[in-house]
Amino acid sequence: MEITRKKNIQIEGKHNKPILCDLFFQDDQKPKPVVIFCHGYKGFKDWGAWDKMAETFAEKGYFFVKFNFSHNGTTPENPTEFLDIEAFGDNNYSIELDDLQSVIDWLLVPDFPDAIQIDVSHINLIGHSRGGAIAIIKAANEKRITRLVTFAAPTDLGAKFPTGKDLEKWEKKGVQYIVNTRTKQQLPHHYQFYKNYKENKERLNVKNATKKLEIPHLIAHGSNDTTVSISCSGELFEWSPISKLLLVENANHVFEASHPWEKEDLPEKFQYLLDRTFPFIAAEVQDLIDEYGDNDDDN
């Protein structure tokens, strides 16, 4: 059956900027398990192979949702370019958690336009990189999520903030810049990013959130990831109560995908990752609990 694609749907968030969403599914008027995908830092929903990934999930019978965080720096008119750099500078982890909640709530209202196509009892979250950490925190607190998959997720959202004199300089100037290696743009981080993190440190603690998880969690990481240490996958596996670890040999942070991705097929290592993700999210939850659950008090 042909895949229906609904691109660049604007939904209202809590932070005065629209959230742009894409839906991929087979229009057979039957309820399907939902997969919601969260992109990473300096990422966007149309990056690289994400469209191809969405098509692959839809072909397998899933209702696939991907979206741009409202302050990721892109705009509704240009969803693949960082043209709103002030929004990028105003972004923070709390906004991203609110955006994800807005997407979940939008999908699950009774008058959602494609409500007939979704199975509200089977909501899966997938997050890449920083989006994986956001997905963990959300899954620990949003009881409607039934399965969690993280691709190359970090374990400490505060680890890359500056310290000492560099932190003092950031506070004094109010802004610091990071180079987008792909576009060579100087992208700002306003000091509010750090301030928001400090004010919400407990809520944004990935370790504590991971330990709170009550759903099955697939933890995937490439062995050649130079952006997020492979040690993070081991930490998540140790903390997550019902977890399976998938290491992809010789894969980098994006599992060999790149932007733009114009080939017909996914990268071999990314296809390998998806081929092992599908049975995980298709399995019965109780079977995964029986196979991967660990109820040790110190886990």
Image (cartoon, rainbow, N blue to C red):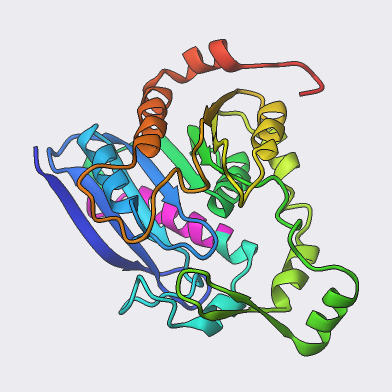
Q: In terms of image quadrants, where is residue 91? A: bottom right
Residue 24 versus residue 250 in the image, above or below? below
Residue 100 versus residue 287 in the image, above or below? below
Identify the residue at image location x=59%, y=45%.
153
Q: Give the range drawn in magenta.
A: 97-114
Identify the residue at image location x=72%, y=34%.
235
Number of marks in the image?
A: 0
Identify the residue at image location x=50%, y=77%.
184
Name the spot of residue 97 as percent of width and height, x first: 57, 57
Residue 121 or 32: which is nearer the viewer? Answer: 32
Q: In terms of image quadrants, where is residue 142? A: top right
Q: Does the magenta stretch include residue 99?
A: yes
Image quadrant in which the C terminus is located: top right
Left or right: where does residue 14 sit relative to residue 268? right
Left or right: where does residue 205 sit relative to residue 131? right
Residue 259 or 175: which is nearer the viewer? Answer: 259
Name the spot of residue 170 as percent of width and height, x first: 79, 81
Residue projecting furthest to the bottom: 173
Residue projecting furthest to the right: 164
- Any part of residue 133 in sight: yes
Identify the residue at image location x=45%, y=76%.
17
Q: Is the magenta stretch mostly helix, strand or loop?
A: helix
